[in-house]
Image (cartoon, rainbow, N blue to C red):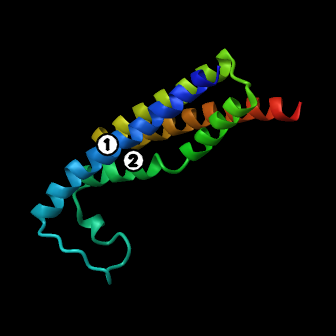
Amino acid sequence: MAQDILQPVIVLLLLNCVMWFWMYATRLPALSKMDYSPDSDAVNGLQMSQLPAKVRWKADNYNHLLEQPVMFYAVCLSLAVIGSVDSMNVMLAWGYVGLRAVHSVVQSVWNNIPTRFILHVVSTLVLVALIVRTAMVLFA
């Protein structure tokens, strides 16, 4: 059923919302503490780079959730439209979402780069498998 492949899509979108709130819940107090005033002439990102690393990590993760997951959304919506939702595709979709959620926690709390890298590679391989399976259905 299309609903089965759309559930992980919505969960990943909800994770995006959580990260947005978490980003501002840490960023706004940090900006207030550093007596921040917006400078439209500042080099892009320069002012934000002055925030503590633990504050920037949440924003970095929020940005990451707006990058590669776009492919995830596209492939899941494609599967729903063409009606090729099987248990393997659903399992891969949930696997991707689970790995991205763990990546978000690691990046936002601990930011251990080797751990993040492994999570990123594994989640990407899961996504590639989902894309290849979808391509096989479309071009078979």
According to the image, label 1 marks what residue?
A: 108
Camera-nearest residue between 136 and 10: 10
Q: Name the residue rendered at 69%, 18% in the picture.
A: 86
Q: Amino acid at mark 2?
A: Asn
Q: Are marks 2 and 1 in contact (CB under 8 Å)?
A: yes
Q: Residues within 10 Å of mark 2 (few under 14, many from 20)?
A: many
Q: Kindly tell me whether residue 95 is visible in this rendering.
A: no
Give SS at disc 2: helix
Q: Name the residue rendered at 45%, 31% in the picture.
A: 11
Up-down: is 112 above or below 79? Answer: below
According to the image, label 2 marks what residue?
A: 61
Q: Amino acid at mark 1?
A: Ser
- Check the picture and name the quadrant holding the N terminus: top right
Q: Earlier in the sequence, mark 2 or mark 1?
A: 2
Q: Name the residue rendered at 81%, 29% in the picture.
A: 137
Q: Position of residue 132 (x, y in %)?
A: 75, 34
- Check the picture and name the quadrant holding the C terminus: top right
Camera-nearest residue between 76 and 116: 76
Q: Position of residue 22 (x, y in %)?
A: 27, 44
| Quarter assignment of residue 80 | top right
Q: Position of residue 40 (x, y in %)?
A: 31, 80
